[in-house]
Image (tube, helix red, strand yellow):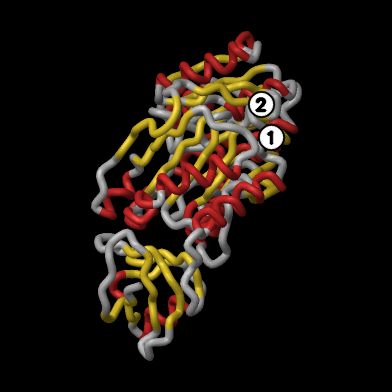
Amino acid sequence: MQTLVLTGRGRRWAESGHPWIYANDIASGQAQAGELAAFAAPDGRVLGHALYSAQSRIALRSVARGTAAPPADWLERRVAQAVGERARQGLLDPAGAERLLAGDADLVPGLIADRYADILVLQSGTLGADKLRERAIEAFATALPFPLRAVLDRSDAPARRLEGLEPRVEWLRGTPCEPVTVREDGLGYLVDVLGGHKTGHYLDQRENRRLAAAGARGERVLDVCCYDGLFGLHALRAGAREAVFVDQNQRALDRARDNAERNGLLERCRFVRADAAQELRRLAEAGERFGVVVVDPPAFAKRKEEVEGALRGYRELNRRAFSICTEGGLVVSASCSYNVQLPQFLDVLRAAAVDSGRRVVLEQVRGAASDHTVLLALPESWYLKCVFLRVHA
């Protein structure tokens, strides 16, 4: 196995525990792109083994620490461990959905695996993960307690460009099927695995949807940036008297409407295609009030240069959300932008509360669902902030 020698700074960074090593922290050595390589301190002491990328700023993604090379079946062991952890969490309902593998956080660099009923969707962001694809499919087929009908590769995330890789969407196994029907806490919904966001759906908000619905009985609910409508639909199943769904994407609204109809909830729904900020402003001017307001926009800051604009956007959305919330009502505000850190997001919410003239109480700060592994040494794996806020006069 080839060895890459780190700079002194690279050694200190590697010994901090972070699983990524950057190209400018490699002093010497050669390795084959997409393959395992050892990485060593300047004195030659091997520190670990990682998948190597020749083009990305992240040159090494750790697979194992220490001098010993990982065993030949390291991938199969990691997949089995990840599936076993989801089973322990009670998530492997054959009709349900979950993240089976969270990439680097589950120590399989660059590879995401989501299951929607009997459809497995893989998403690879690196050349190393591309080369592991077939082994991963076999490993999941062995580890899962029920058969898969089909496997889809949704490797079309923009991050692939940083690795010099082209986007790729293709069915790999089984019979192509679209859309897929999934059940979540008794609610049936459709997933567009070919064209939907991420791998088709926002699995990371599953537990937050459940919590938001718990206080919705008898309330009017506003689901802003609703996507497929699951925040609002869960609230309706919990006894909300009406839900208004707002999104700019007509396909998402159509899917939300279909989900409402298949669950017998359509008569209590209203669907609005509009810009979120403009619709919140219109609702405020019309004197509309809601007992639960969910604000869950797509990532505003995918790069550090976009953070300042993102903070302005979050402030405006949440100011409007607070202003149309009933006395004692609930605002659920989310940010999936890793580059917007939690202290920044909380500060923006504070400023939005002041702007709105409301007294806002912080009830809970939550992250992604438990199947979205958060590795403490990899802060990038804690990207979702979901804040529950109680609004008063």
Could you tell which of marks 2 and 1 lies nearer the N-terminus? 1
- Name the quadrant containing residue 11: bottom left
Q: Position of residue 91 (x, y in %)?
A: 67, 39
Can the viewer see residue 359 in this picture?
Answer: no
* Label 1 neighbour load within 10 Å: few <14, some 14-19, many 20+: some
Q: Which mark is residue 249?
A: none
Q: Quadrant of the C terminus?
A: top right
Query: Relative to residue 94, is residue 337 drawn left or right?
Result: left
Query: Relative to residue 138, is residue 358 drawn left or right?
Result: right
Identity of the amino acid at label 1? Arg
Nearest the viewer among 371 and 120 is: 120
Q: Position of residue 76 (x, y in %)?
A: 53, 53
Q: Residue at x 61, y 30 (%)?
A: 231
Q: Quadrant of the N terminus?
A: bottom left
- From the image, tell me which residue sits under label 2: 234
* Label 2 neighbour load within 10 Å: few <14, some 14-19, many 20+: many
- From the image, tell me which residue sits under label 1: 210
Q: Is residue 13 positioned above or below 207 on the image? A: below
Identity of the amino acid at label 2? His
Q: Residue at x 26, y 73 (%)?
A: 30
